[in-house]
Amino acid sequence: MIAFASYLFFASASPAAGSHADPVAPILIALVAMSFAAAIGGRVMQRFGQAAVLGELLIGVLVGNLGYLYHQPGITIIREGDSISNIEQTALLQKVSVGEAARQILPAGPHTEEIAKILEGPVGLKVLAIHTFLDQLSRIAIIILLFLVGLETSLKEMRAVGWTASLVGGLGVILPLGLGLLVTTILLPASSFGAHLFIGGVLTATSVGITARVLRDLGQMDRPESKIILGAAVIDDVLGLLVLAVVTALIVQGSVSLVNILGITLKAVLFLAGSIGIGMWVTPMIVRRLARLQIENVKLIFGVGFAFVLSWLANLAGLATIIGAFAAGLILERFFDKELGGFSLRDMLSPVESLIVPIFFVLMGLQVKLEAFNNLSVAILAAALTAVAIGGKIFSGFAAGRGLKRLAIGIGMMPRGEVGLIFAGIGRGLGVVSDSIFASIVIMVIITTMLTPPLLKLTLARGLPKAIGDPA
């Protein structure tokens, strides 16, 4: 089955039989291949008790590296990621061929010559079309994903978990960020401070969805530890998004100073607080008027449109688009489904999520270059990032205080999952995450995600206290 999915993907960029072929045809077969591969990978991992996202990522890694090994043109181009976008822009601005632009952008060598020959050859336009479409679709996918995360995040529940979850979540951001800065300063001395900050920011992420799934499967959702884990993970994500917003803006501006950091932090906080505050005041009035118009599918149209508008506004403010999508979900979470009847917005978006979000994770896997690990320094970096990613979250669990299984809380904060991949993908797009760093981050994401279910099950199975204050 994997071989069949690989064949479909490889065939997507093969020369067309006729000269009048529909240009969308190779894109269609590429989408079929990626969806098929994602379904296989997700199902296999679920059979082993792992999250589907891990299978989607691993199948991408497998197909991407096999395709490159056997010199498949579509895979070879797609795995270059944002470098291809830079090549296209250079070709347009300097009015040179895409092959010549590739030679200008990429390091000189046999690999660059292979890229240039593909782009100049008969399948060049097709693979560029596939890459451009998949790149844009994956960007929309992460906006949808963060919108759904916001819809599932209750501000009321965040307040209810109180001081303990806030302390664990805050420490779960500070420790990985600080440790990440230390490790990258030592191992990547030639990289910019902005790159160090971004890698540290990636380490702050926690996948709420993966942890919640594990706790639900174990039947432990009602335990005090579980509530603290989920509350802290949500706080972690909010703080992590703020860190991402600040670091992204610093990298775009090209300068790092205390004034800049404080200014961008203030802007990010004001955007989140302002959009949520104003949105919760204005949006109900708009929604009630829309409800009276009885427009077909108004819930879906307004919900997705609202997420896209806030994402656009976040970008206008110099922040990541996913900040706006997350804020949109938080705003609509409280009242939207109550005001407009029928299926919930979450249920209505579920088919869209199932269709396009896995493509993002397969694409991330496709862009992992395993040949980077031929360099010992890359393997060392991957091991170091994994160690600090695990250690930073586990130690944050000890902020929960006595009477709780603090190790279980730390382990529950450990998986990076889809959130870490989203952060890494944004860093790659900004040019601060190289191929070797990206591969190291993906290895960290895979290991932390795979370790969490068995370790959490082990720690929760050992006579956890029934309530806070009971003997551990």
Image: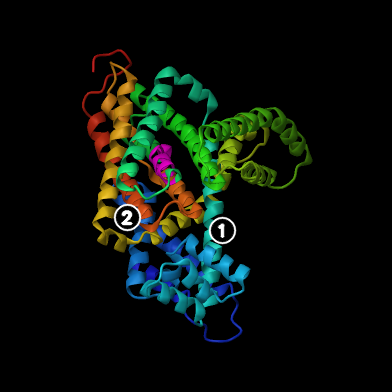
Vertical comparison of 303 with 29: above or below: above
Q: Secondary structure at mark 2?
A: helix
Vertical comparison of 210 with 459: above or below: below
Kind of residue indicated by mark 2:
Val
Residue denoted by label 2: 44
Residue 42 can be seen, yes or no: no
Kind of residue indicated by mark 1:
Gln
Q: Is 46 situated left or right of 117 in this image?
A: left
- Asked whether residue 205 is drawn in magenta, I would say yes
Q: Quadrant of residue 284?
A: top right
Q: Residue at x 64, y 34 (%)?
A: 336
Residue range (magenta) = 195-209
Q: Nearer the viewer, mark 1 or mark 2?
A: 1
Closest to the observer, 225 or 428: 428
Q: Quadrant of the N terminus?
A: bottom left
Residue denoted by label 1: 136
Q: CA distance from mark 1 to mark 2?
A: 28 Å
Q: Secondary structure at mark 1?
A: helix
Q: Residue at x 42, y 63 (%)?
A: 36
Q: Would you say the magenta stretch is mainly helix, strand or loop?
A: helix
Q: Is 290 situated left or right of 52 in this image?
A: right
* Image coordinates for residue 168, horizontal then vertical, percent: 38, 25
Q: Indicate how the structure is coloured in the image.
A: rainbow
Closest to the observer, 145 or 374: 374
Q: Quadrant of residue 117?
A: bottom left
Which residue ends up furthest to the top in the rendered image?
Answer: 469
* Image coordinates for residue 388, horizontal then vertical, percent: 29, 38
Q: Is 249 situated left or right of 217 in this image?
A: right
* Image coordinates for residue 146, horizontal then vertical, percent: 52, 42
Q: Quadrant of residue 207?
A: top left
